[in-house]
């Protein structure tokens, strides 16, 4: 880092920078500054974009509340208005009044495009959901379920299923009303609530499940048509191929309706809805019409209290004759509640339409299921022969079995032999029997199957298109392109058609059907969990306008949905969950650069805050000491070697904060300055787990003081300051040297450990000005680069390079030499130990060097070995240096004198009237003869120690040396700087000067 001096009095010409700092964000018009005013790309000023004169009575840049300030999209036919920035309001910038008068012309823009088709809550959601919920099971399986479970338990099954879908509907309503909903339906709701990881996986399988569901409903339709053809003796090829042919033709017709546009698709759905309603009315009328003898022979006797009472209790039959068996068969008929949400992009107001339409659809379909179960159970007996001659005769009154005996029919033979072909326990087409006109029930089956198939064919591409546009998965982006005013996913329709045709050609969906049901249940579970998670995190952003939900009921709905998955088909549930986990893992690995403000982020914040607060309740312990480093990197990309070295031993272990001090001579400038996100992005791309903290200050030392005292949170705050060695100190201003050494003193005063890293190549990757400023050639004047922008977050920064450093390579079997010359609490030993725990340094051998007496060399070695062994560091090579206190070579002493010479008091200064105290106050870097003599022994020690390092550690991978400490006020900054220079000069390996805060960081006790 380089020092930034105090701000000069003269300002900077902002107009000179106007072209360089014009900004265009992702949304909104481009705007810039021409030296006198801010202006938009269309020529209007910022002030012209508001109505402040109307609101306040005077001309001002300040504006009142406006929708455009919070919207992410621009309304058709008008220019989006922008709120003035704080810099515009706070800075002393004049705005031309002529531009204020031009506000009335802001909206003279080109003609708006035609509005795409949008649907209300009835046509867009309620009818669509009701059609998707009603299906073949309603017509062909509900009477049979009623016969098995009885009317009472059938109602329980219906209500339980509706409770699950109702809870999901409430959760969907809450999520859909927590902000503006765009296209993408289920995927959009989950991904924007739980994040891209779970949202992406569910979106992909949900779109696939809808595409396969098209084939399921189409095959159901084709089987019904084939059965009618078989009854009339008609056939195309054979039964299985007839189903395939009819199915492919049907899917092709549905595709044509979909490609015609959402408006035609909606009209087709209304037609199907009308057909189903007519079939229901036909069924209700049929229950009232008195039964003919032909219908009585098949078990239909109109409304009878005895039949209702008999059918109210269960009569389990067959291998599936149990409550959960019937529940697993019925539950898929209650699904389909997301059909309206899946076309959220085509709704006029999704936040109103989705809650109202979905909940109304659940209510009406549940009511219809309950009515049909009760009426069919009150009209039809469980068993009937269908033979007109099975009337009751007097001779068989006593032996007659079954409820039909009371109405003059004897079905004893088929009941005893279990061969009755009719009755709700045996005939799936009981609703056709009861209805007034049987073909209308067949039409209802056609309407239910085709409407469900059409809804799925529309839902799958819509969800898939939104997923493709988010670029969470490779390759699929091709299918995200839309066409027309409704942005129709034509390519998605073709893909869904191909998938549906493939499964129609298989014509055997009994195996895949449970998996599809489980995919839908996965979606229900995650929607409920999304609502619960968003509520439990207490995020201020969770403010749904729909209030009729409970987070605990949503959690219950999620748990029950997972349980039902395993009750339906346990192996299919495992497959569905396995696919979700696989897709989740892929997105977690790729880490897409999206930020949707998910509840997962809010939950992470809550957990981090809770843990930080809980740490304050426990005192620090030596066993849990971690070197938490504040690294003075400046912009991290400028000193990659420093970042890589510290990141090596702090990764997944302790705190690392990259500190940066911004020079700021212009008080009127924007205080947020530049590129916080770009620095964090650079660190993330380099896989450095570090925080970034920048401060604005008049000079470097003041800024570092702010970092030393303000960085961190609670117990998670730095305790070690790590900086690079100032290589250019002899060319720099003496005041800069004093500031640099003053930073080390400030760190010691605040009980920090201090480390200084020096490499042979130097640490600065770029020698040009960044944000601190750069020294000019005369070493007196500084050039400032002040960034003036309207919106710092909108600035697009160029990606910084990722250069390689020595700390990124494998170190092999080199040595790590540790010169533990003074006991600083153990930090000098702890750092190399942490380094050896990393893979790149694991093969290095650690050598510990200590000073000693030649007479007691072996004894001192044993003492140090015993001490280190108690620390359990695994260091076994200890060397005692008895000659460390020897006198250095004369040429090295002269070299040091030449180094310190420019900073010594000369004869003229000695003969002057300036006292030593005044000189020390005005020029604290100057060195007097008395200070040289007082610190002579320390000086000779540093010179000698450099000679020792040259002899013993020439080929080491890195050298750790205990850093000398200069007394404040007794050791001038230039002399201290010369010590550090002499100690670490001319060494090939990197050198880390380490000094702990003289408090223990190692212990050999267990408590």
Image (cartoon, helix red, strand yellow):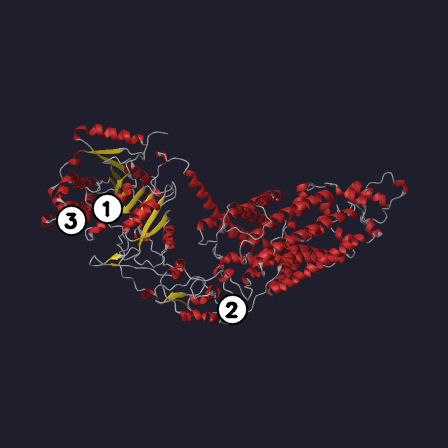
Q: Earlier in the sequence, mark 1 or mark 2?
A: 2
Q: Is mark 1 on a helix, strand or loop?
A: helix
Q: Which residue lies furthest to the front in this view?
A: 57
Q: Where is residue 941 in the image (x, y as percent from the top left)?
A: 17, 39
Q: Say left or right for 240 vs 934.
A: right
Disc 2 target residue: 77
The answer to whether 476 is drawn above or below residue 313 in the figure is below
Of the numbered discs in the image, which one, if any, rests on residue 741? Answer: 1
Mark 3, Cα crowd under 10 Å, few <14 / some 14-19 / many 20+, is some
Disc 3 target residue: 903
* Residue located at (43% from left, 40% from top): 613
Q: Do the residues labelled 1 and 3 touch (CB within 8 Å)?
A: no
Nearest the eye: 799 or 658 = 658
Q: Earlier in the sequence, mark 1 or mark 3?
A: 1
Cα distance in 3D space between marks 1 and 3? 15 Å
| The C terminus - image quarter | top left
Q: Which of marks 2 and 3 is nearer the N terminus?
A: 2
Q: Is mark 3 on a helix, strand or loop?
A: helix
Of the numbered discs in the image, which one, if any, rests on residue 230? Answer: none
Q: Say left or right for 86 vs 518.
A: left
Q: Are marks 2 and 3 in contact (CB under 8 Å)?
A: no
Q: Where is residue 517 in the image (x, y as percent from the top left)?
A: 61, 49
Q: Say left or right for 418 vs 684.
A: right
């Amino acid at each position: 880092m380089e020092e930034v001096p105090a701000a000069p009095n003269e300002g900077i010409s902002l107009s000179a920078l106007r072209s360089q700092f014009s900004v265009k964000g992702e949304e909104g018009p481009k705007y810039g500054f021409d030296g006198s005013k801010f202006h938009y790309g269309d020529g209007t000023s910022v002030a012209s974009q508001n109505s402040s004169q109307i609101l306040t009575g005077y001309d001002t840049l300040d504006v009142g509340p406006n929708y455009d300030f919070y919207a992410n999209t621009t309304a058709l036919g008008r220019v989006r208005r922008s709120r003035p920035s704080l810099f515009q309001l706070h800075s002393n910038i004049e705005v031309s009044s002529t531009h204020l008068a031009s506000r009335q012309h802001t909206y003279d823009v080109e003609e708006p495009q035609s509005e795409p088709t949008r649907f209300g809550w009835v046509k867009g959601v309620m009818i669509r959901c009701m059609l998707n919920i009603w299906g073949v099971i309603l017509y062909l399986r509900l009477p049979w379920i009623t016969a098995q479970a009885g009317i009472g338990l059938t109602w329980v099954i219906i209500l339980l299923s509706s409770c699950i879908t109702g809870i999901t509907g409430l959760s969907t309503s809450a999520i859909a009303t927590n902000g503006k909903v765009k296209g993408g339906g289920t995927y959009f709701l989950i991904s924007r609530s739980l994040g891209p990881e779970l949202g992406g996986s569910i979106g992909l399988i949900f779109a696939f499940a809808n595409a396969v569901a098209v084939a399921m409903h189409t095959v159901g339709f084709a089987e019904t048509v084939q059965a009618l053809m078989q009854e009339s003796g008609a056939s195309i090829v054979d039964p299985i191929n007839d189903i395939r042919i009819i199915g492919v033709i049907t899917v092709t017709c549905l595709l044509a309706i979909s490609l015609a546009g959402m408006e035609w698709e909606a009209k087709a759905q209304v037609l199907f809805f009308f057909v189903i309603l007519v079939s229901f009315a036909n069924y209700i009328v049929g229950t009232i019409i008195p039964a003919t003898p032909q219908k009585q022979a098949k078990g239909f006797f109109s409304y009878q209290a005895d039949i209702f009472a008999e059918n109210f209790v269960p009569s389990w039959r067959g291998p599936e004759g149990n409550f959960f068996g019937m529940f697993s068969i019925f539950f898929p008929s209650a699904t389909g509640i997301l059909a309206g949400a899946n076309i959220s992009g085509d709704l006029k107001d999704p936040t109103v339409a989705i809650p109202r339409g979905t909940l109304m659809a659940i209510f009406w379909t549940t009511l219809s299921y309950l009515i049909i179960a009760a009426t069919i159970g009150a009209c039809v007996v469980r068993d009937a022969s269908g033979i007109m001659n099975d009337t009751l005769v007097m001779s068989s009154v006593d032996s007659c079995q079954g409820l039909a005996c009371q109405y003059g029919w004897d079905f004893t033979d088929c009941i005893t032999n279990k061969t009755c072909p009719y009755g709700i326990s045996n005939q799936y087409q009981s609703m056709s029997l009861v209805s007034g006109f049987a073909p209308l029930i067949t039409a209802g089956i056609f309407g239910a199957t085709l409407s469900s198939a059409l809804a799925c064919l529309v839902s799958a591409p819509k969800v898939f298109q939104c997923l493709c546009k988010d670029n969470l998965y490779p390759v699929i982006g091709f299918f995200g392109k839309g066409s027309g005013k409704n942005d129709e996913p034509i390519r998605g329709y073709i893909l869904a058609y191909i998938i549906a045709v493939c499964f129609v050609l298989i014509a055997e969906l009994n195996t895949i059907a449970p998996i599809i049901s489980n995919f839908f249940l996965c979606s229900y579970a995650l929607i409920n969990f999304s609502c619960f998670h968003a509520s439990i995190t207490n995020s201020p952003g969770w403010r749904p306008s729909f209030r009729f939900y409970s987070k605990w009921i949503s959690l219950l709905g999620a748990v029950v949905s997972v349980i039902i998955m395993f009750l339906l088909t346990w192996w299919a549930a495992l497959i569905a969950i396995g696919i979700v986990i696989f897709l989740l893992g892929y997105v977690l690995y790729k880490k897409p650069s999206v930020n949707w403000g998910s509840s997962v982020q809010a939950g992470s914040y809550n957990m981090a805050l809770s843990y930080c607060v809980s740490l304050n309740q426990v005192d620090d312990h030596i066993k849990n000491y971690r070197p938490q480093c504040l690294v003075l990197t400046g912009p991290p990309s400028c000193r990659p070697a420093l970042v890589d070295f510290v990141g090596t031993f702090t990764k997944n272990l302790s705190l690392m904060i990259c500190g940066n001090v911004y020079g700021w001579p212009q008080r009127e400038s924007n205080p947020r300055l530049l590129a916080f996100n770009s620095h964090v992005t650079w660190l993330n791309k380099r896989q450095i787990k570090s925080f970034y903290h920048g401060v604005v200050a008049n000079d470097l030392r003041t800024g570092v003081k702010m970092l030393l005292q303000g960085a961190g949170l609670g117990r998670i705050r730095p305790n070690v300051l790590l900086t690079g060695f100032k290589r250019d100190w002899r060319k720099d201003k003496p005041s800069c040297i004093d500031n640099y050494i003053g930073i080390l003193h400030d760190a010691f005063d605040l009980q920090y450990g201090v480390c200084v890293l020096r490499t042979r190549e130097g640490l600065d990757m770029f020698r040009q000005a960044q944000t601190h400023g750069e020294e000019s050639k005369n070493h007196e004047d500084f050039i400032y680069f002040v960034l003036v922008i309207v919106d710092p977050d909108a600035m697009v920064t160029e990606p910084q390079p990722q250069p390689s450093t020595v700390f990124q390579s494998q170190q092999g079997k080199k040595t790590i030499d540790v010169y533990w010359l003074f006991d600083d609490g153990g930090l000098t030993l702890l750092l190399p130990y942490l380094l050896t725990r990393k893979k790149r340094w694991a093969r290095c051998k650690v050598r510990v060097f200590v000073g000693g007496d030649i007479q007691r060399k072996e004894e001192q070695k044993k003492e140090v070995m015993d001490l280190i062994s108690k620390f359990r560091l695994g260091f076994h090579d200890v060397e005692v240096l008895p000659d460390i206190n020897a006198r250095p070579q004369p040429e090295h002493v002269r070299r040091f004198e030449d180094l310190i010479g420019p900073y010594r008091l000369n004869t003229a200064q000695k003969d002057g009237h300036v006292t030593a105290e005044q000189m020390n106050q005005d020029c604290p870097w100057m060195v007097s003869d008395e200070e040289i003599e007082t610190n002579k022994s320390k000086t000779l020690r540093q010179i000698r120690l450099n000679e020792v390092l040259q002899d013993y550690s020439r080929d080491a991978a890195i050298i750790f040396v205990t850093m000398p400490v200069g007394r404040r006020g007794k050791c001038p900054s230039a002399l201290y700087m010369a010590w550090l220079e002499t100690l670490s000069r001319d060494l090939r390996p990197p050198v880390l000067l380490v000094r702990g805060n003289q408090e223990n960081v190692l212990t050999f006790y267990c408590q």
